Image: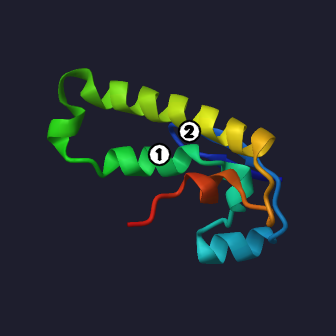
Amino acid sequence: MLTVTTTTTNELFPMQASPATVSRCGMIYFEPVSLGWKPLLDSWMHDLPEEWKSEGSGEYLNDLCVWILTNSLKFVRKQCKMMLVIGDSNLARYES
């Protein structure tokens, strides 16, 4: 277990890297499966133009995306036959 303590957080993470490796690199790798798709949405929301996020529009857009993605991923998992195992974060990802 790795314990991360800052002025705002105190979290424990199971890990396979040694503490010396983590302290030298200053980073920890997380499998996409363990994170899910919500960090992708958070990153996308952060990068939106400010006019899209003003006057409560950002919260509404975020709630709408959560509702759509949650139900869409449930549908895909239950109703579609997948030829490959694909994580939710890859299914939710938008590439233009």
Q: Amino acid at mark 1?
A: Leu
Q: Could you tell me if the residues under marks 1 and 2 are in contact, i.e. CB atoms within 8 Å?
A: yes
Relative to 44, does residue 26 appear above or below in the rendering?
Answer: below
Q: Amino acid at mark 2?
A: Leu
Mark 1 crowd level (few <14, some 14–19, many ≥20, 10 Å Cα): some
Given residues 19 and 75, the one toward you in this image is: 75
Question: Which residue occupies 68% across, 67% down?
Answer: 29
Q: Which residue is mark 2?
A: 69
Q: Circle 2 — which element?
A: helix
Residue 24 horizontal/vertical position (percent): 63, 77
Relative to 68, does residue 41 appear above or below in the rendering?
Answer: below
State which tag comes first along the sequence, 1 or 2. Answer: 1
Residue 61 horizontal/vertical position (percent): 35, 31
Q: How is the image coloured?
A: rainbow
Cα distance in 3D space between marks 1 and 2: 10 Å
Given residues 43 and 15, the one toward you in this image is: 43
Instruction: Give the quadrant of residue 12.
Output: top right
Q: Tell me, for residue 41, which label it has, or none.
A: 1
Question: Which residue occupies 80% across, 71% down?
Answer: 17
Given residues 35 and 84, the one toward you in this image is: 84
